[in-house]
Image (cartoon, rainbow, N blue to C red):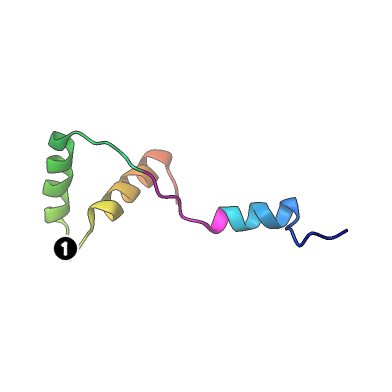
Amino acid sequence: MNSGGKTTKESDENHEKLDFRFTLRVPSAIIHQIDEHRKKKIGSFSRNNWILEAIEEKLDVK
């Protein structure tokens, strides 16, 4: 009987496409440092993008 669910493979493929949202507590001193670095970049660069870039650099994601 088909219940209309997805196979494990389909579920895994969809899972990889999702963005995950979570709360991250960051000390205010670090936020101020992040904001100072963001101001040095040309154009508008969100705090979220700066943090993602820092994570990618740490993980050596290319």
| Residue 4 location (% of width, % of height) | 76, 62
| Residue 19, above or below 24 | below
Find the magenta span and give its range.
16-22
Residue at the image position 61 percent from the left and 58 percent from the top: 14
| Residue 19 location (% of width, % of height) | 46, 55
Identify the residue under disc 1: 42
Q: Residue furthest bottom?
A: 43
| Residue 45 location (% of width, % of height) | 22, 60
Q: Nearer the viewer, residue 39 or 29?
A: 29
Residue at the image position 54 percent from the left and 58 percent from the top: 17
From the image, give the main secondary structure of the stretch colored magenta.
loop
The answer to if 8 sits in the magenta stretch is no
| Residue 12 location (% of width, % of height) | 65, 51
Q: Nearer the viewer, residue 43 or 19?
A: 19
Q: Nearer the viewer, residue 29 or 50?
A: 29
Residue at the image position 28 percent from the left and 52 percent from the top: 48
When asked about the image quadrant of residue 44, the answer is bottom left
On-image quarter of the N terminus: bottom right
Q: Nearer the viewer, residue 27 or 60?
A: 27
Q: Is residue 46 left or right of residue 5?
A: left
Q: Is residue 43 left or right of residue 53?
A: left
Q: Is residue 51 left or right of residue 28?
A: right
Q: Is residue 41 left or right of residue 60?
A: left
